[in-house]
Amino acid sequence: MIDRATVDRIIDAAKIVDVVGEFVTLKKAGVNYKGLCPFHDDRNPSFMVSPTKNICHCFVCGKGGTPAKFLMEHEQITYPEALRWLARKYNIEIVEKELTDEERAQQSERESMFVVNEWARDWFHDTLKNSPDGIAIGKQYFRSRGIRDDIIEKFQLGYAPQRRDALCSAAIAKGYKKDFLLKTGLCIENEKGIYDRYSGRAIFPWLNVSGKVVAFGGRVLDSRTKGVAQKYVNSPDSDIYHKERELYGIYQAKKAIVKEDRVFMVEGYTDVIAMHQAGVENVVANSGTALSVYQIRLLHRFTNNITLLYDGDEAGIHAAMRGTDMLLEEGMNIKVLLLPDGDDPDSFARKHSTEELKRYIDEHQTDFITFKSRLTVENVSDPVKRSEGIGGIVKSISVIPDQILRSTYISEFSRRIGMKEQTLIAEMNKYIRRSLEEKEKEREREQRRQQPATAAAPLPPQTGMPDVPPIYIPGEGFVEPEPIAPPVSEEPLALHTPQEQASKVELLLIREVVRHGEEIIFDNVETEDGGTVTLNVAQYIDFDLSQDGLQLTLPVYRQILQEAVAHSGEPGFKAETYFCGHPDLEVSQLATSLAIDRHQLGRRFVVEEREGSLCHRVRHLMMDFRLDLMEARLRSIQQELRTAGGDMKRMMQLLQEHKDTKEIRDALARQLGSDLVV
């Protein structure tokens, strides 16, 4: 357990810009910062970070919160884990007792897998540095590849001994469960027993964007590669590792990617390591798998610019080609660099100095149009193949979401191949229309899949009721009464989401509670017993509602108001800080969204700020709230009048209630300065 004083130190030290900046590229926007949201597919910056309030919030998906809340959501970790992450970042010491067997058993399976992987990473690394075989075999392999000791430390490289159960035996002796050794993929079990997956291999740990060990790659050493079917063995997919979502080297590269505003994509572990050793750190690898949309979106958080850096052979060309359209569709700006024949990024980086490597990259990387045009169109004499090449490039351009960039590429391509721009535009529009049609069909198919297999048969049309005369509904005139249809279900029909059921006025009221709940707006208010009290924003709203037995629509609104009132007497209580850091995720997300102004994103207001004093605003909102209630009741009465049928007594009661409600509505409207009279 972490003691309260240490928790407070961690929370006080944590700066939201520092924490979010570890995962998202942020740009100044007035007094705040903005960037692409890491929680959804965001192409226009909708993620706002407020250093003064020390919170973040996405105005599209609604996620965010305090530094700890952000980490919990982003890394899918518990609150204590988030605190430990922050403590490591800000060098705050946490003294914790050793976990007992019972406490260890209570840890979540996911957390346990991370713990096992972290131990294995350290064990492999220690074996490399300190065991006789590690020094003689493992370290010798890395030195033969020209990898320095400081780079071995940076990437925590390791070595797995030849003995087939070395890691397994050591882990079980340390108290780690066999179940987690199997689930992480560190060990394999068959009818003969359990054994190590990576025995006799050089070890490359995979770290996710926050530095947690999610997987391993093991390479057979050079002397054993002949006749070996699998040069590399990688961790299987698990609860903490999905290969299509991870990139090797992202943790070590993310700061350099932001600084350089560019990422280099290579294929293998040693390519990444060699580039780092050569002084180019903004480099990651997808390790031979096809580039996925998840990996692209991960990179997009840090930069829009990517250079595909591959071998110049046929395999390298194929690797560069296969990810191009997906990168373009996700809004990435692509350059391609194929190295001279016989070289891969690893060997090329080892042959050249940092300056030579960077100069070669700058001089030889080309945009994807030039690359693809040279490869498939230019110097191609066969008309059919040339036509196919042109069509392929136009199709690639068609997926670019930015219209101006599409137009620029079409113009450039037209100039390169000497073809009329209008011809290319017409072809591009065909691809765009076809893509839109396919997306619409997919959307329709998805809707059909989500519909229940059998739908209730429609009710037969109801006949009129000629024996009941038309009735007069105020504001609508004479209308025919509707017959009362028999109920078709015992369950109420939910026509709106809870947010739609709650009025905008309620949201504005809760915003005032979150932002100013503790601020006094009435002094010396007389009570029934002759005394006086002061009322803050939360207390006044609660008091006003209670006078007529009213309450807010949503439970989360009521919870915020009740807690603000309950904490009003506490010294130092600040509603905004309290609710933004609330342990209830729904409360903290709502509070965070209300604490940050949308207009700082450059978008129009959704919740507008009223002019005037705080007291005036709150009183005005309470009258708005009551006016909304009266309007809703009037609509309800009108609906009841339509369905009253021949019940004249009930109709007279409803008409009288309509008259009384309308008088109250009109009085409120006059107070609010409205001319609403019907």
Image (cartoon, grey):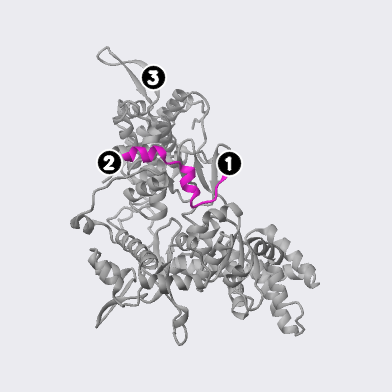
Which of 52/477 is in front?
A: 52
Q: Which mark is residue 633?
A: none
Instruction: Name the front one of labels 3 and 2.
Output: 2
Secondary structure found at label 2: loop
Q: Which mark is residue 522?
A: 3
Which of 492/279 is in front?
A: 279
Residue 337 image point, x, y percent: 65, 69
Image quadrant in which you'd find residue 543:
top left
Is 8 one of the magenta-colored residues?
Answer: yes
Q: CA distance from mark 3 to mark 1?
A: 36 Å
**Left or right of 336, for residue 637:** left
Residue 251 image point, x, y percent: 48, 58
Q: Is residue 501 visible?
A: no
Q: CA distance from mark 2 to mark 1?
A: 37 Å
Which of 431/80 is in front?
A: 80
Residue at image x 40%, y 28%? Answer: 664
Q: Which mark is residue 29?
A: 1
User: As displayed, is residue 642 above or below residue 109?
Assistant: above
Q: How many marks?
A: 3
Which of 202/363 is in front?
A: 202
User: As displayed, is residue 461 above or below residue 140?
Assistant: above
Which of pointers 3 and 1 lies earlier in the amino acid sequence? 1
Is 370 one of the magenta-colored residues?
Answer: no
Residue assigned mark 2: 3
- State the residue lying farthest toward the bottom: 227
- Few, some or many residues within 10 Å of mark 2 (<14, 14–19, 20+): few
Q: Amino acid at mark 1?
A: Ala
Which of pointers 2 and 1 lies earlier in the amino acid sequence? 2
Question: The magenta stretch spans which residues?
Answer: 6-28
Q: Amino acid at mark 3?
A: Phe
Residue at image x 56%, y 50%? Answer: 45
Q: Amino acid at mark 2?
A: Asp
